[in-house]
Image: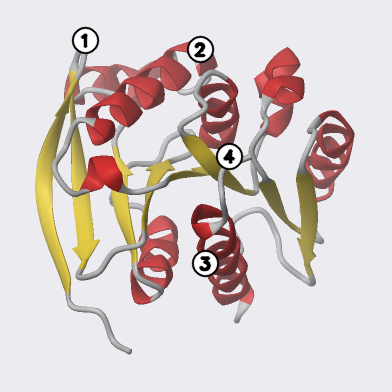
Amino acid sequence: MAHRVTTRAVSVGNDVTLEADLSLPDRATGVVMFAHGSGSSRHSPRNRQVAKALQDRGLATLLLDLLTEDEERVDLRDGSYRFDIPLLAHRLSGAAGWVSRQPVLGALPLGLFGASTGAAAALIAAAGSPAVRAVVSRGGRVDMAGEALGAVSCPVLLLVGARDEVVLRLNERALAALPRADLVVVPGATHLFEEPGALEQVADHAATWFATHLLAPAQ
């Protein structure tokens, strides 16, 4: 059954105000927040393609900028914020608190989707919040989550391109540290999953993971 999706820009307020795009299907069964990777933004076409697949499965999505506009300008010059994983994780946790206070959204089970360095932030946020029910990482620098990996109690899906060899090795190591995780290697794909059909596979795996684990009873 097709879902009617309403999309609007929102301001997510905590200790700073962050800009985001919220897409809410009718009869939504969960909500997934997106943490983009280094040098990217909520306008990332790859994350938007994945978000559309989630919306088609009845999941609300929140595509979020973890930096303010001023911080993004500084980061574009010198990269000073994109690898500040504790800051990004703090911002993501604050956004999760904002979601929990919203009508409709606050009643939905919460998942996190992180790409590149955003995946590390998502895992740290999940480790600190029992409200997070599932995490998906796309080409994630999950190694940058450090000791938090062992404290992530929710199910985690690691998606890595077969030709993204360095990141694949890092994800294989992280898999051993995560209590509940699966690793899926996308054949022929590089870091950005630009090959024909690669991102479609990412979107399908992510949608199935969230649809399965956000609807499952909390453990």
Query: Which residue is at a point 53% across and 18% down the rendered structure image?
Result: 128
Gap in Å between the C-alphas at discs 4 and 3?
18 Å
Using the image, determine if residue 206 lies above or below residue 140.
below
Q: Which residue is mark 2?
A: 86
How far across and down, in percent of the image, does residue 46 sit? 44, 60
Q: Amino acid at mark 4?
A: Ser
Q: Which mark is residue 77?
A: none
Q: In the shown orientation, is residue 180 left or right of residue 192? A: right
Structural crowding at the residue carrying mark 3, measured as other residues with C-alpha within 10 Å and reported as few (<14), some (14–19) or many (≥20): many
Q: Quadrant of the N terminus?
A: bottom left
For label 1, the SS is: loop
Q: Are marks 1 and 3 in contact (CB under 8 Å)?
A: no
Q: In the shown orientation, is residue 80 left or right of residue 127? A: left
Query: Which residue is at a point 11% across and 41% down the rendered structure image?
Result: 10
Q: Which residue is mark 1?
A: 15
Q: Which residue is mark 3?
A: 207
Q: From the viewer's side, name the closer residue of 70 and 91.
A: 91
User: Disc 2 or 1, which lies upstream in sequence?
Assistant: 1
Inspect this view and state whether residue 81 appears: no
User: Disc 4 or 1, which lies upstream in sequence?
Assistant: 1
Q: Amino acid at mark 1?
A: Asp
For label 4, the SS is: loop
User: Disc 4 or 3, which lies upstream in sequence?
Assistant: 4
